[in-house]
């Protein structure tokens, strides 16, 4: 926040400017459901105006954004007068501010220093839209938005579509008129799925689950709202006709739950500022893994009698406070859009940002995923953008603030040539991915990424061969993975910050990696569409590298988990002379793996097991499962790890579990150990 002016005229001018900005933001947020700035920015402006008004009380007037909660309802929905105003909450941004809040309350309640700590209801601050539900004789008669706190909009038809909102209360004992308040929100999983679908259809996506929830509630057609994955937690009681339903807030929430209303399981009763602080820390730790977005926690004095005594100040109760988490969204400026070239040549646009602190870290880059995403979001150099970093998710540009775009900003175009090696860039048909056509020999970016993949833990697992070293190597003598095996420690020691000892360690690690397994080796080659699991299936199915190299699309399709796309990629890979030269070179460099399990033996060509796809499960007594598997292969069968429709036989030993159940369900032939042994040729029986 900028320093407060001391001169009244300067203060008045600044207050007017802030009020105007806040009004505009309010309108976009509450009326259009399309905010152009993150909450953190809004909060800063509001706090600055509050501070100014505190220092210059003459500046306060009824129309000031500090004197009301939201904005007027838009035309299209009927207005609803709230029988009790729907208020807002004061914010705290540190444990200290909560300590002061608790102290203020104790003073107002005239509690002696030695009096026991106060009890609070501690709850997540849900990030959705506040609503009021009106029940008459246990039936939902009206649902309304908060609006400006006094007047909201009638959204009954839309709210009735939300499954977690009961149309009729259950149990008994509810007051004849009961108003319940709570938050309607969209769980993260539903939000992600909805946005994925919208993006796939080329439609506008929502910036965050809160906007999605608010937007869904203001659909003119309830059938559309019904399709949105909305949910609701009730967190307060509003107007009641008749006797109070409880003496405490947590007691009232428990009653609501009894009557079939949905409440949040994370609500707890805590004692004093210390109890509040530990609740805040524990919810903060869970935040990223919760199924819904929260932006802080709310502490409410639990005793209704104490709440009544404390009362309200203009827009918020004195008995409650919201402690906010660090913002997950911030504004910053795009300084450039760079194109990163991956291992397969894929070009990824990355926004270079003016560094900004968001979600607990400083962010200076954010991925834009691919050209389609870039086009859809229309991010341009110079744009002000909303950067979002939720939990451990990689930072992303959530949206552009359109009205802050500088004049003359041009759309970012896909480069025609690779920014690293200048080879032509190709985009096949409507594919989302554009690629550099240079290949690893010409394009150093592809070479570097390929080497990183080759050396990585799940591939050849070369310890100590990190990114920095690989980058230096790729610029000198290492043009292919096979060159790694020809390095000497003296060559490595010549690089920056490489002592003799570490150079020797790297050489040892490279040497150690020569002894590997076929699946690791296949994965390390970086064949497109061949991840760890597919590499494993290919190795098990073909047994040897030679057999795999000789495979064609048809034989590849017989492999478990291999579909037409993978089959095509694998065949393509092995039909490329450069790839075969690389493999030969690697083998010549001494890379080896254990002998394959025996391959089908000609003399058993008509065995029972020839051509069968067998799964072994449970424990066998006459031999191990590995030995049984080797026999099946020797007899021309295939052994796979999991039961699927391709499985033709299950051999079930003792204590067989889920695989047996699945095979029974799929009506696959099942042998016990005795039957298995009986079907072996006599010469191979144990
Ligand atoms: S109580 C008089 N409890 O925060 C107090 N509000 O800034 C009324 N909110 O409009 C609110 N979770 O949209 C309360 N557990 C919670 C809440 C919560 C989210 C929202 C609600 C309210 C806003 C106040």
Image (cartoon, rainbow, N blue to C red):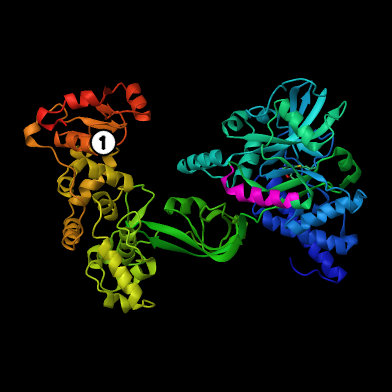
Q: Is residue 16 left or right of residue 386?
A: right
Q: Which residue ends up furthest to the left in the rendered image?
A: 603
Q: Is residue 58 left or right of residue 27?
A: right
Q: Return the residue at label 1.
A: 625
Quarter assignment of residue 160 = top right
x, y percentage for residue 605?
9, 31
Quadrant position of ligand 1: top right
x, y percentage for residue 683?
10, 31
x, y percentage for residue 321?
78, 49
Can residue 219 be seen here? The reply is no
Q: Above or below — where is 563 with respect to 36?
A: above
Question: Looking at the figure, which quarter contains the N terminus?
Answer: bottom right
Q: Above or below — where is 524 with respect to 161?
A: below
Residue 400 in the magenta stretch? The answer is no
Q: Above or below — where is 648 with respect to 368?
A: above
Measuring 81% from the left and 41% from the top, which residue is drawn there? 302
Q: Secondary structure at mark 1?
A: helix
Residue 287 in the magenta stretch? The answer is yes
Q: Is residue 118 left or right of residue 404?
A: right
Quarter assignment of residue 256 = top right
Q: Which residues are magenta?
A: 275-290
Measuring 81% from the left and 65% from the top, which residue is drawn there? 13
Q: Nearer the viewer, residue 534 or 69?
A: 534
């Amino acid at each position: 926040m900028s320093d407060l002016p001391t001169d009244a005229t300067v203060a008045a001018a600044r207050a007017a400017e802030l009020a105007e900005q806040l009004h505009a933001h309010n309108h976009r947020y509450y009326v259009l459901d399309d905010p152009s700035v993150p909450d953190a920015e809004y909060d800063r402006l509001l706090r600055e105006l509050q501070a100014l008004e505190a220092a210059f009380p003459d500046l306060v007037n009824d129309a000031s954004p500090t004197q009301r909660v939201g904005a007027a309802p838009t035309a299209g929905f009927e207005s609803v007068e709230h029988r009790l105003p729907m208020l807002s909450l004061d914010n705290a941004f540190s444990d200290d501010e909560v300590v002061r809040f608790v102290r203020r309350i104790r003073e107002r309640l005239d509690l002696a220093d030695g009096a026991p700590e106060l009890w609070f209801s501690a709850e997540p601050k849900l990030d959705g839209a506040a609503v009021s539900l009106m029940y008459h004789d246990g039936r939902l008669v009206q649902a309304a938005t908060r609006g400006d706190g006094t007047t909201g909009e009638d959204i009954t038809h839309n709210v009735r579509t939300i499954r977690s909102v009961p149309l009729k209360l259950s149990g008994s004992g509810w007051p004849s008129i009961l108003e319940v308040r709570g938050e309607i929100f969209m769980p993260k999983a539903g939000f992600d799925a909805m946005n994925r679908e919208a993006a796939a259809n080329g439609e506008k996506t929502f910036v965050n689950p809160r906007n999605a929830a608010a937007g869904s509630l203001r659909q003119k057609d309830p059938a559309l709202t019904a399709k949105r994955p909305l949910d609701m937690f009730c967190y307060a009681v509003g107007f009641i006709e008749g006797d109070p339903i409880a003496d405490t807030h947590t007691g009232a929430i428990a009653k609501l739950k009894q009557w079939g209303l949905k409440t949040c399981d994370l609500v707890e009763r805590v004692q004093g500022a210390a109890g509040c602080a530990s609740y805040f820390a524990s919810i903060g730790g869970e935040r990223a893994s919760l199924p819904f977005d929260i932006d802080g926690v709310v502490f409410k004095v639990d005793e209704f009698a104490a709440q009544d005594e404390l009362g309200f100040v203009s827009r918020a109760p004195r008995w409650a406070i919201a402690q906010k988490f660090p913002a997950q969204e911030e504004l910053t400026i795009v300084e450039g859009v760079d194109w990163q070239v991956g291992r397969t040549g894929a070009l990824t646009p990355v926004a270079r940002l003016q560094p900004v602190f968001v979600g607990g870290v400083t962010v200076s880059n954010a991925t834009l995923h691919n050209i389609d995403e870039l086009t859809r979001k229309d991010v341009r150099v110079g744009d002000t953008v909303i950067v979002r970093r939720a939990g451990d998710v990689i930072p992303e540009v959530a949206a552009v603030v359109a009205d802050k775009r500088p004049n003359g900003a041009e759309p970012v175009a896909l480069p025609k040539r690779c920014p690293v090696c200048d080879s032509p860039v190709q985009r096949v048909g409507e594919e989302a991915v554009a690629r550099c056509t240079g290949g690893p020999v010409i394009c150093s970016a592809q070479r570097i990424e390929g080497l990183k993949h080759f050396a990585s833990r799940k591939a050849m697992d070369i310890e100590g061969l990190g990114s920095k070293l690989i980058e230096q190597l790729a610029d000198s003598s290492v043009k292919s993975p096979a060159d790694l095996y020809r390095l000497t420690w003296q060559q490595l020691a010549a690089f920056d910050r490489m002592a003799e000892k570490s150079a020797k360690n790297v050489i040892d690690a490279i040497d150690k990696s020569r002894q590997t397994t076929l699946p690791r080796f296949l994965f390390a080659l970086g064949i497109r569409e061949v991840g760890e699991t597919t590499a494993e299936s290919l190795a098990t199915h073909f047994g040897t590298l030679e057999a795999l190299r000789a495979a064609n699309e048809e034989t590849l399709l017989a492999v478990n988990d291999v579909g037409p796309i993978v089959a095509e990629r694998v065949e393509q890979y092995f039909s490329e002379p450069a790839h075969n030269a690389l493999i030969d070179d690697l083998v010549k460099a001494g890379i080896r793996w254990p002998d394959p399990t025996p391959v089908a033996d000609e003399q058993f060509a008509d065995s029972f097991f020839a051509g069968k796809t067998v799964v072994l499960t449970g424990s066998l007594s006459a031999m191990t499962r590995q030995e049984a598997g080797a026999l099946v292969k020797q007899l021309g069968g295939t052994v796979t790890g999991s039961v699927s429709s391709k499985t033709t036989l299950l051999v079930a030993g003792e204590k067989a579990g889920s695989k047996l159940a699945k095979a029974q369900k799929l009506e696959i032939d099942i042998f016990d150990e005795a039957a298995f042994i009986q079907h072996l040729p006599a010469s191979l029986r144990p």
